[in-house]
Image (cartoon, rainbow, N blue to C red):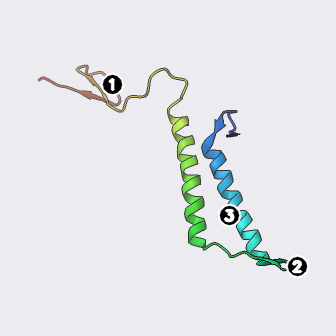
Amino acid sequence: MVWIKNTEGKKDAMLTFALIAFGVVTLNILLSTVGKITIGTFSINFQAMQASAMTAYLGATFTAYVSRRWTDKKYNEDEDEAPSVIPSVSTEKSSDAKNKIRIDNG
């Protein structure tokens, strides 16, 4: 499959799916404005999608794309190890112990 490249030059599946979703909804809106095409005895009708279906279709796709981009930005993929969600434990009383749990024995 051919993936569209994002602004960083990386192949991006979610961007590809988001653009396909946008194209499908846009094409449906344009074709539903025409309504009906008749050529000789051949006739084809186009019905509009419901607004709620279009919103759900586009909303879920674009939300997945944006949240994946946010995750990539927050946790740089170039780092060798994954970020820790568990805070460090320290017995030091220093002021630079941000995001650490300090154990005080006394």
Q: Is tag 2's residue or tag 1's residue first in the polypeptide sequence?
A: 2
- The quarter in which the N terminus is drawn is top right
According to the picture, the residue beneath numbered tag 3 turns out to be 25
Q: Amino acid at mark 2?
A: Gly
Between 27 and 106, the one nearer to me in the picture:
27
Q: Amino acid at mark 1?
A: Ser
Residue 51, percent across and down?
Answer: 60, 72
Residue 92 appears left or right of 76: left
Farthest-out residue, left: 106
According to the picture, the residue beneath numbered tag 2 turns out to be 40
| Secondary structure under the numbered disc 2 in the rendered image | loop
Q: Amino acid at mark 3?
A: Val
Q: Is tag 3's residue or tag 2's residue first in the polypeptide sequence?
A: 3
According to the picture, the residue beneath numbered tag 1 turns out to be 95
Quarter of the figure with residue 22: bottom right
Give the mark toward the camera: 2 or 1.
2
Task: Determine the CA span between mark 2 and mark 1.
Answer: 82 Å
Task: Determine the CA span between mark 3 and mark 2.
Answer: 28 Å
Between 16 and 55, the one nearer to me in the picture:
16
Residue 14, percent across and down?
Answer: 60, 45
Kindly identify the residue that appears in the image at 54 percent across and 42 percent down. Answer: 68
